[in-house]
Amino acid sequence: MPTTSAFTGGDHMQPWSLTVDRLITHAARWHGDRELVSREADGRIVRSSWAASERRARRFSAALLAAGIRPGDRIGTLAMNGARHVEAWFGMMGVGIVCHTINPRLFEDQLAYIVEHGGDRWLLADPMFAPLAEQLRARCPSIERVIYLCDAGGLPPGAAPGSDFDGLLAAHEPDAAWGGFDEHAPAALCYTSGTTGHPKGVLYSHRSQLLHTMICAQADAIALSARDTVLAIVPMFHANAWGLPFMAAAAGAKFVLPGIKLDGRSVYELLETEAVTFSGAVPTVWQVLLDYLTVNRLRLSTLKRVAIGGSACPEALIRGFRDGHGVQVLHAWGMTELSPIGTVAGRAPPEVAARGPDAELALNLKQGRVPFGVDMKITDDEDRRLPHDGRTPGHLRVQGPAISARYFREDREALDAEGYFDTGDIGTVDEHGYLQITDRAKDLIKSGGEWISSVEIENIAAGHPKALMAAVVAIPHPRWRERPLLVVQLKDGASATRDEFLGFLEGKIAKFWMPDDVVFIEKMPLGATGKLDKKVLRTRYPGSAAS
Ligand code: ADP
């Protein structure tokens, strides 16, 4: 007798591997005319389209393969946001080469460490980063070649002829075949500041990037549409610009890339001339923009929504956007290890919305809810789950397909017994499922969206001949959100000045790591195990927090 069910076991759906080349292929095929607009370093506006950039990306793939770069190899990028950078990304990832975005603002020693640890074979650099790129080439034997993201006319002085990206593309056909490999293959690499020791590499897979894009596409997350024009201010070296290049391609949105100039006037001009509807950046950038708009009595005429994250979003920003410009703020929390979006506070749940705009604003000051595809819990020091009562703070732990399980070149999984990743953040969760970050357990300071390692500064300062112990805590700053304060206990009988210590740090750390102040303390507070007790220091220097 024939059975009614034809089930024979196995998956009956198509084996459509989740690789990121599909995103730009989709954009080129179905939204091919939608523009990619870049502002070059000299201020010129250059226009491309998803279709044209896809072809250029394929040319780049062909160039890489012809040069003997193989799937799994890493290529570093030292570049701001521009269409060439986007083309380079997809060109690498399309054929399984790993795109390693590098933050050019880091100190040279850290950069050299990152490039060597990544094992980068080529470096792609904006011409403005030529001195840095050449220094790294001299220090890091793995680098075979530096390619500049420009045309022949834009090459920096001393660059090898033929080392321009456009020339390389012109020499190859747009015929590289993309995809066709395991979706678990690595796509991108991004280093994040280690609390202690060296930066750690987060190795994203094709699958994790693609799923992150779809997680963010949900209505209560980022929700880009083909009608959006997206300005990606958050740099492409910060956790893939929060995934915006992937999201814009998936949605078929117009994509605007601002280059290096992020002052109020430059951002305002781009927002208006390109009729931007959505943008994302850290609070500092938005604060500068709103100040510029207020001073010059200007209004934003097209912008509808902005994602703000990387640091807590101040109330004044949400109010400034809402009341002055009718712009909705999506307060987002995340981290490099999360690809990076973890939570988003956008449209409040109906029961809160019913209580009016101020109730909604109060809720949106929190970091938001998890979209489908991210799960979170808060725990006590013994890994026990804590209640979601909006009052009890705990260690924030997260789980999901776009969340890192272990760092690059490390075998040990960084997960707890239930498979959750400890974020190093401390927070509460309320009855609506809204997360509020209240503190930071990891020993880092975040200044204008960039990390400062307290431990590294402490170690150097403690090496001063007059220092017995040194500690660094965060103090609040109106523009940068947090700045480092150096606290020193001198050796018995020694005396020293603030400038002596600042002078000692000079040249040993990046300029933006330089503490804003130095205070001397009689006796450093120590915990039961003889370790420095930063909790006590934080209460002693009011406003210092979460360092
Ligand atoms: P990103 O490059 O996205 O800023 P990082 O990994 O460098 O990611 O930084 C992540 C950390 O930044 C978080 O663990 C948290 O401490 C802090 N952070 C990010 N977003 C927020 C936010 N909205 N509010 C408070 N802190 C935040």
Image (tube, rainbow, N blue to C red):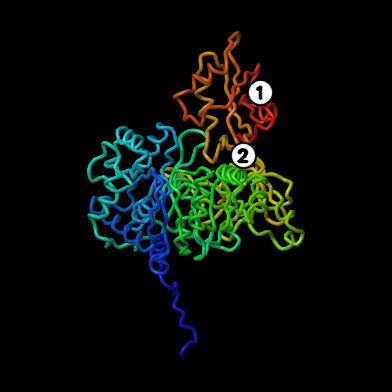
**Residue 6 spot, x, y in % from top left:** 46, 82
**Residue 304 spot, x, y in % from top left:** 59, 58
Residue 346 located left or right of residue 387: left
Please indicate, yes or no, whether residue 422 appears anywhere in the rendered image: no
Depth order, front residue of 112/516:
516
Instruction: Please name which of the two marks, 1 or 2, marks the residue nearer to the observer.
Output: 2
**Residue 316 spot, x, y in % from top left:** 67, 45
Say which mark, if any, is on residue 440.
Answer: 2
Image: 203 above or below 533: below
Image: 522 above or below 253: above
Residue at image position (61%, 32%) is 474
Please tell me how crowded label 1 is: few (under 14), some (14-19), or many (20+) other residues with Cα within 10 Å: some
Specify the quadrant of the image occupied by residue 535.
Answer: top right
Quick one: which residue is furthest to the top in this view? 493
Q: Secondary structure at mark 2?
A: strand
Ligand 1 within 8 Å, label 2 CB: yes
Q: Secondary structure at mark 1?
A: loop
Sequence-first disc among 1 and 2: 2
Depth order, front residue of 201/472:
472
Depth order, front residue of 378/314:
314
Which amino acid is tagged 2? Arg
Say which mark, if any, is on residue 295.
Answer: none
Badge 1 is on which residue?
525
